[in-house]
Image (tube, rainbow, N blue to C red):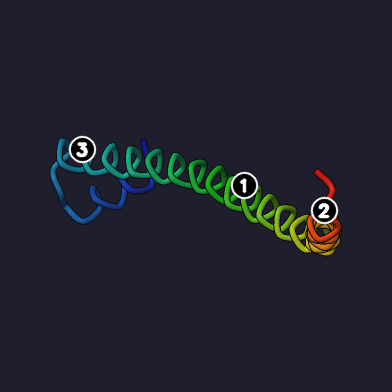
Amino acid sequence: MKVAVYEAFRSLGIAEDKSLKAAEALSARDTDVDDLKSDMRLVKWMVGALIGLCLIILGSTFTLMPRVGDLGGQISQIARSGHP
């Protein structure tokens, strides 16, 4: 419970039970915010991992493209030469 919130409400003349409920509600809100922060850390990590994976795949694609082109040229040469 947020003692400072409770005391602030009491100093404003708000009833004890209402002050207590308000302090508990704010405490529950803090718990929810902490849960959201934890979830956001996980989402940020997952997005970072996916970006890294995409960059690896993209780099591999550009690295393999010349080899695929050479292979295509070799296949067309074999096809023109008439080898079965």
For the residue labelled by badge 3, is the local secondary structure a helix, a strand or a loop?
helix
* Image-based side of 67 in relation to 10, left or right: right
Q: Is residue 49 above or below residue 59?
A: above
Mark 1 or mark 2: which comes first in sequence? 1
Q: Where is residue 49 drawn, in percent x and y?
A: 65, 48
Q: Is residue 70 above or below residue 15?
A: below
Q: In front here: 66 or 75?
A: 75
The N terminus is located in which quarter? top left
Q: Which residue is drawn at 64% across and 53% down?
A: 48
3 vs 2, front mark: 2
Where residue 18 sits, quadrant-wise, is top left
Q: Which amino acid does label 2 sit on?
A: Gly
* Image-based side of 7 in relation to 43, left or right: left
Q: In front here: 22 or 34?
A: 34
Q: Where is residue 6 drawn, in percent x and y?
A: 30, 44
Q: Where is residue 8 drawn, in percent x and y?
A: 30, 52
What numbered label is drawn on residue 21? Answer: 3
Question: How much space separates mark 3 and mark 2, taking CA atoms?
Answer: 88 Å
Crowding near the residue tagged with mark 1, few <14, some 14–19, many ≥20 C-alpha atoms within 10 Å: few
Question: How much space separates mark 1 and mark 3, taking CA atoms?
Answer: 37 Å
The C terminus is located in which quarter? top right
What numbered label is drawn on residue 82? Answer: 2
What numbered label is drawn on residue 45? Answer: 1
Crowding near the residue tagged with mark 2, few <14, some 14–19, many ≥20 C-alpha atoms within 10 Å: few
Q: Which residue is drawn at 35% across and 40% down?
A: 27
What numbered label is drawn on residue 35? Answer: none
Q: What residue type is labelled 1?
A: Trp
